[in-house]
Image: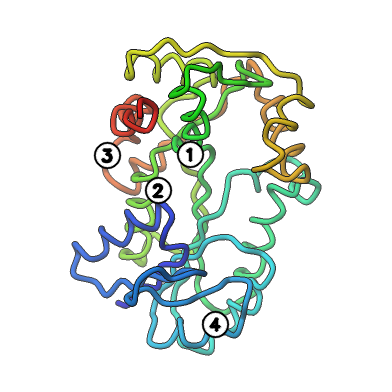
Amino acid sequence: MTVLVTGSRGSVARSLLTLLRDRGLDARPASKRPDDPQTLKCDLTDPATFPAALKGVTSVFLYAEPSCAGAFAEEAARAGVEHIVLLSSSAVLTPDPDSSLLAKSHLEVERALEASPVRATSLRPGSFAGNTLGWAWSVKSGRPVGLPYPGSHNDPIHEADVAEAALAVLTDPALSGRPYTLTGPQSLTFAQQIDILSEVTGRDIPVKHLSREEWKEEMAEYIPASYADPLLDWWQSNDGRPVEITRTVQELTGHPARPFADWAREHAAAFTG
Protein backbone atom coordinates (compact mmCIF):
# COMPACT_ATOMS: atom_id res chain seq x y z
CA MET A 1 0.00 0.00 0.00
CA THR A 2 1.22 3.47 -0.92
CA VAL A 3 -0.59 6.32 0.81
CA LEU A 4 -0.50 9.96 -0.27
CA VAL A 5 -1.08 12.16 2.79
CA THR A 6 -2.16 15.65 1.73
CA GLY A 7 -1.90 18.66 4.02
CA SER A 8 1.15 17.02 5.52
CA ARG A 9 2.04 19.95 7.76
CA GLY A 10 -1.24 19.62 9.68
CA SER A 11 -1.34 17.91 13.06
CA VAL A 12 -3.58 15.04 11.94
CA ALA A 13 -1.49 14.38 8.83
CA ARG A 14 1.79 14.43 10.77
CA SER A 15 0.46 11.89 13.25
CA LEU A 16 -0.92 9.72 10.46
CA LEU A 17 2.39 9.71 8.58
CA THR A 18 4.13 8.41 11.71
CA LEU A 19 1.50 5.72 12.24
CA LEU A 20 1.68 4.54 8.63
CA ARG A 21 5.48 4.36 8.67
CA ASP A 22 5.43 2.49 11.97
CA ARG A 23 3.34 -0.12 10.12
CA GLY A 24 6.02 -0.33 7.44
CA LEU A 25 3.80 1.28 4.81
CA ASP A 26 4.92 3.65 2.06
CA ALA A 27 3.57 7.00 3.26
CA ARG A 28 4.16 10.00 1.03
CA PRO A 29 3.69 13.48 2.51
CA ALA A 30 2.24 16.11 0.19
CA SER A 31 1.75 19.82 0.66
CA LYS A 32 0.83 22.96 -1.22
CA ARG A 33 4.19 24.37 -0.18
CA PRO A 34 6.68 21.52 0.39
CA ASP A 35 9.35 22.46 2.90
CA ASP A 36 11.69 19.50 2.34
CA PRO A 37 12.75 17.31 -0.61
CA GLN A 38 10.76 14.30 0.70
CA THR A 39 7.43 16.16 0.50
CA LEU A 40 5.55 16.08 -2.78
CA LYS A 41 3.90 19.18 -4.18
CA CYS A 42 0.13 18.76 -4.24
CA ASP A 43 -1.81 21.99 -4.31
CA LEU A 44 -5.47 20.98 -3.97
CA THR A 45 -6.45 24.19 -5.78
CA ASP A 46 -4.19 23.41 -8.78
CA PRO A 47 -5.04 20.29 -10.84
CA ALA A 48 -1.72 20.56 -12.67
CA THR A 49 -0.03 19.23 -9.51
CA PHE A 50 -2.28 16.17 -9.20
CA PRO A 51 -0.81 13.67 -11.73
CA ALA A 52 2.74 13.66 -10.34
CA ALA A 53 1.54 13.49 -6.73
CA LEU A 54 -0.85 10.58 -7.43
CA LYS A 55 1.55 8.48 -9.53
CA GLY A 56 1.87 5.01 -8.01
CA VAL A 57 -0.52 5.80 -5.14
CA THR A 58 -3.11 3.27 -3.95
CA SER A 59 -4.74 5.30 -1.14
CA VAL A 60 -5.11 8.98 -0.27
CA PHE A 61 -5.72 10.90 2.93
CA LEU A 62 -7.40 14.03 1.63
CA TYR A 63 -7.99 17.41 3.18
CA ALA A 64 -11.27 19.07 2.23
CA GLU A 65 -10.63 21.68 -0.45
CA PRO A 66 -13.75 22.09 -2.61
CA SER A 67 -12.48 24.20 -5.50
CA CYS A 68 -10.98 21.31 -7.49
CA ALA A 69 -12.34 18.28 -5.65
CA GLY A 70 -13.97 16.86 -8.77
CA ALA A 71 -10.74 17.17 -10.76
CA PHE A 72 -8.82 15.49 -7.95
CA ALA A 73 -11.25 12.58 -7.86
CA GLU A 74 -11.04 12.17 -11.64
CA GLU A 75 -7.25 12.19 -11.63
CA ALA A 76 -7.20 9.74 -8.71
CA ALA A 77 -9.36 7.35 -10.72
CA ARG A 78 -7.06 7.68 -13.76
CA ALA A 79 -4.03 7.02 -11.56
CA GLY A 80 -5.52 3.79 -10.22
CA VAL A 81 -6.15 5.02 -6.67
CA GLU A 82 -8.35 2.50 -4.84
CA HIS A 83 -9.42 4.41 -1.73
CA ILE A 84 -9.69 8.04 -0.60
CA VAL A 85 -10.16 8.92 3.07
CA LEU A 86 -11.51 12.45 3.42
CA LEU A 87 -11.04 14.61 6.49
CA SER A 88 -14.51 16.13 6.43
CA SER A 89 -16.52 17.72 9.26
CA SER A 90 -19.60 16.93 11.31
CA ALA A 91 -20.88 20.34 10.13
CA VAL A 92 -22.24 18.50 7.08
CA LEU A 93 -24.84 16.91 9.39
CA THR A 94 -26.53 20.23 10.20
CA PRO A 95 -30.15 20.58 9.00
CA ASP A 96 -29.29 22.84 6.06
CA PRO A 97 -25.58 22.40 5.29
CA ASP A 98 -25.81 24.09 1.88
CA SER A 99 -26.67 27.38 3.57
CA SER A 100 -23.53 27.36 5.70
CA LEU A 101 -20.18 28.07 4.06
CA LEU A 102 -18.49 26.10 6.84
CA ALA A 103 -20.53 22.97 6.11
CA LYS A 104 -20.85 23.41 2.36
CA SER A 105 -17.11 23.44 1.74
CA HIS A 106 -16.83 19.95 3.20
CA LEU A 107 -20.08 18.69 1.71
CA GLU A 108 -18.99 19.64 -1.80
CA VAL A 109 -15.90 17.47 -1.47
CA GLU A 110 -17.96 14.57 -0.12
CA ARG A 111 -20.30 14.88 -3.10
CA ALA A 112 -17.40 14.96 -5.56
CA LEU A 113 -16.02 11.75 -4.08
CA GLU A 114 -19.45 10.09 -4.08
CA ALA A 115 -19.66 10.76 -7.83
CA SER A 116 -16.27 9.14 -8.40
CA PRO A 117 -15.63 5.44 -9.03
CA VAL A 118 -12.93 5.51 -6.35
CA ARG A 119 -14.04 4.07 -2.99
CA ALA A 120 -14.32 6.89 -0.45
CA THR A 121 -14.58 7.12 3.33
CA SER A 122 -15.44 10.35 5.13
CA LEU A 123 -14.22 11.09 8.63
CA ARG A 124 -16.40 13.76 10.23
CA PRO A 125 -14.82 15.15 13.40
CA GLY A 126 -16.53 17.95 15.28
CA SER A 127 -14.34 20.35 17.22
CA PHE A 128 -10.60 19.72 17.41
CA ALA A 129 -8.99 20.05 20.82
CA GLY A 130 -6.25 22.00 19.06
CA ASN A 131 -8.69 24.80 18.26
CA THR A 132 -8.02 26.08 21.77
CA LEU A 133 -4.50 27.03 20.69
CA GLY A 134 -6.21 30.16 19.43
CA TRP A 135 -6.37 31.23 23.08
CA ALA A 136 -2.66 30.65 23.74
CA TRP A 137 -1.48 34.20 23.13
CA SER A 138 -4.08 35.62 25.53
CA VAL A 139 -3.24 33.06 28.20
CA LYS A 140 0.53 33.62 27.92
CA SER A 141 0.13 37.38 28.07
CA GLY A 142 -2.30 37.28 31.01
CA ARG A 143 -5.12 38.79 28.98
CA PRO A 144 -8.70 37.53 29.20
CA VAL A 145 -9.88 35.06 26.60
CA GLY A 146 -12.64 36.82 24.65
CA LEU A 147 -15.65 34.60 23.96
CA PRO A 148 -19.07 35.43 22.53
CA TYR A 149 -20.64 32.18 23.85
CA PRO A 150 -18.59 30.82 26.78
CA GLY A 151 -21.43 28.39 27.56
CA SER A 152 -21.43 26.89 24.08
CA HIS A 153 -20.80 23.14 24.03
CA ASN A 154 -18.44 21.31 21.71
CA ASP A 155 -16.94 17.82 21.45
CA PRO A 156 -13.16 18.39 21.48
CA ILE A 157 -11.33 15.49 19.87
CA HIS A 158 -7.61 14.85 20.14
CA GLU A 159 -5.95 15.04 16.74
CA ALA A 160 -4.15 11.76 17.49
CA ASP A 161 -7.52 10.01 17.71
CA VAL A 162 -8.47 11.31 14.27
CA ALA A 163 -5.14 10.05 12.89
CA GLU A 164 -5.68 6.62 14.45
CA ALA A 165 -9.21 6.48 13.02
CA ALA A 166 -7.77 7.32 9.59
CA LEU A 167 -5.18 4.57 9.97
CA ALA A 168 -7.93 2.07 10.82
CA VAL A 169 -10.04 2.82 7.75
CA LEU A 170 -7.01 3.00 5.45
CA THR A 171 -5.68 -0.41 6.50
CA ASP A 172 -8.92 -2.38 6.95
CA PRO A 173 -11.03 -2.56 3.77
CA ALA A 174 -14.02 -3.80 5.78
CA LEU A 175 -14.22 -0.37 7.49
CA SER A 176 -14.09 1.70 4.33
CA GLY A 177 -16.72 3.17 2.06
CA ARG A 178 -18.93 4.94 4.59
CA PRO A 179 -18.91 8.08 6.77
CA TYR A 180 -17.89 8.17 10.44
CA THR A 181 -18.77 10.90 12.94
CA LEU A 182 -15.88 11.36 15.37
CA THR A 183 -16.08 13.13 18.73
CA GLY A 184 -14.10 13.42 21.90
CA PRO A 185 -15.40 11.60 25.00
CA GLN A 186 -17.19 14.60 26.56
CA SER A 187 -19.40 17.51 25.66
CA LEU A 188 -17.61 20.52 27.16
CA THR A 189 -18.38 24.22 27.15
CA PHE A 190 -15.65 26.67 26.23
CA ALA A 191 -15.68 27.80 29.86
CA GLN A 192 -15.08 24.23 31.04
CA GLN A 193 -12.18 23.85 28.62
CA ILE A 194 -10.67 27.03 30.02
CA ASP A 195 -11.07 25.67 33.55
CA ILE A 196 -9.17 22.54 32.51
CA LEU A 197 -6.41 24.62 30.91
CA SER A 198 -6.23 26.73 34.06
CA GLU A 199 -5.79 23.65 36.23
CA VAL A 200 -3.18 22.12 33.92
CA THR A 201 -1.13 25.30 33.51
CA GLY A 202 -1.55 26.58 37.07
CA ARG A 203 -2.67 29.93 35.70
CA ASP A 204 -5.80 31.91 36.36
CA ILE A 205 -7.41 32.40 32.94
CA PRO A 206 -10.07 35.11 32.96
CA VAL A 207 -12.86 35.15 30.38
CA LYS A 208 -14.23 38.29 28.78
CA HIS A 209 -17.70 38.10 27.27
CA LEU A 210 -17.75 39.65 23.79
CA SER A 211 -20.61 40.49 21.51
CA ARG A 212 -20.67 38.81 18.12
CA GLU A 213 -19.48 42.00 16.44
CA GLU A 214 -16.67 42.53 18.96
CA TRP A 215 -15.44 38.98 18.42
CA LYS A 216 -15.57 39.35 14.63
CA GLU A 217 -13.58 42.57 14.90
CA GLU A 218 -10.93 40.89 17.06
CA MET A 219 -10.67 37.92 14.68
CA ALA A 220 -10.96 39.81 11.39
CA GLU A 221 -7.28 39.28 10.61
CA TYR A 222 -7.63 35.50 10.95
CA ILE A 223 -11.21 34.53 10.06
CA PRO A 224 -13.10 36.03 7.09
CA ALA A 225 -16.60 37.28 7.86
CA SER A 226 -18.02 34.65 5.48
CA TYR A 227 -16.74 31.95 7.85
CA ALA A 228 -17.10 33.89 11.09
CA ASP A 229 -20.88 34.23 10.89
CA PRO A 230 -21.58 30.49 10.33
CA LEU A 231 -19.16 29.70 13.16
CA LEU A 232 -20.92 32.11 15.51
CA ASP A 233 -24.29 30.68 14.50
CA TRP A 234 -23.03 27.18 15.31
CA TRP A 235 -21.79 28.25 18.74
CA GLN A 236 -25.06 30.02 19.42
CA SER A 237 -27.03 26.89 18.53
CA ASN A 238 -25.01 24.91 21.10
CA ASP A 239 -25.08 27.55 23.82
CA GLY A 240 -26.15 25.67 26.95
CA ARG A 241 -26.91 22.56 24.91
CA PRO A 242 -24.62 19.51 25.20
CA VAL A 243 -23.67 17.99 21.87
CA GLU A 244 -24.12 14.33 21.04
CA ILE A 245 -21.10 12.14 21.72
CA THR A 246 -20.27 9.06 19.64
CA ARG A 247 -18.23 5.94 20.44
CA THR A 248 -16.78 5.82 16.94
CA VAL A 249 -13.19 6.44 18.02
CA GLN A 250 -13.30 3.40 20.31
CA GLU A 251 -15.01 1.29 17.64
CA LEU A 252 -12.31 2.14 15.08
CA THR A 253 -9.20 2.24 17.27
CA GLY A 254 -10.00 -0.13 20.13
CA HIS A 255 -9.55 2.51 22.83
CA PRO A 256 -11.75 5.32 24.21
CA ALA A 257 -11.29 8.79 22.81
CA ARG A 258 -8.67 10.78 24.71
CA PRO A 259 -10.12 13.38 27.11
CA PHE A 260 -9.44 17.07 26.58
CA ALA A 261 -7.39 17.13 29.81
CA ASP A 262 -4.87 14.76 28.19
CA TRP A 263 -4.50 17.07 25.22
CA ALA A 264 -4.15 20.07 27.56
CA ARG A 265 -1.34 18.41 29.53
CA GLU A 266 0.51 17.50 26.32
CA HIS A 267 0.27 21.08 25.03
CA ALA A 268 0.62 23.02 28.28
CA ALA A 269 3.85 24.65 27.09
CA ALA A 270 1.96 26.38 24.29
CA PHE A 271 -0.03 28.28 26.94
CA THR A 272 2.81 29.02 29.33
CA GLY A 273 5.58 30.09 26.97
- The residue where tag 3 is placed is 255
Q: CA distance from mark 1 to mark 4?
A: 29 Å
Residue 165: x and y in percent read 37, 51
Residue type beneath disc 1: Phe
| Residue located at (50% from left, 37% from top) | 131
Residue type beneath disc 4: Thr
Residue type beneath disc 3: His
Disc on the earlier residue, 2 or 1: 1
Of labels 4 and 2, the one closer to you: 4
Determine whether label 1 and label 4 are within 8 Å by CB: no
Disc on the earlier residue, 3 or 4: 4
Determine whether label 4 and label 2 are within 8 Å by CB: no
Quadrant including the N terminus: bottom left
Q: Furthest-front residue in view? A: 141
- The residue where tag 2 is placed is 162
Disc on the earlier residue, 3 or 1: 1
Local packing at callout 3 (Cα closer than 10 Å; few below 14, some 14-19, many 20+) is few
Quarter of the image holding residue 271? Answer: top left
Of labels 3 and 1, the one closer to you: 1
Residue 128 tag number: 1
Label 2 secondary element: helix
Q: CA distance from mark 3 to mark 4?
A: 38 Å
Local packing at callout 4 (Cα closer than 10 Å; few below 14, some 14-19, many 20+) is some
Side of 200 relative to 130 (left or right): left
- The residue where tag 4 is placed is 49
| Residue located at (19% from left, 62% from top) | 22
Q: CA distance from mark 3 to mark 1?
A: 18 Å
Label 3 secondary element: loop
Of labels 3 and 4, the one closer to you: 4
Determine whether label 2 and label 1 are within 8 Å by CB: yes
Q: CA distance from mark 4 to mark 2?
A: 26 Å
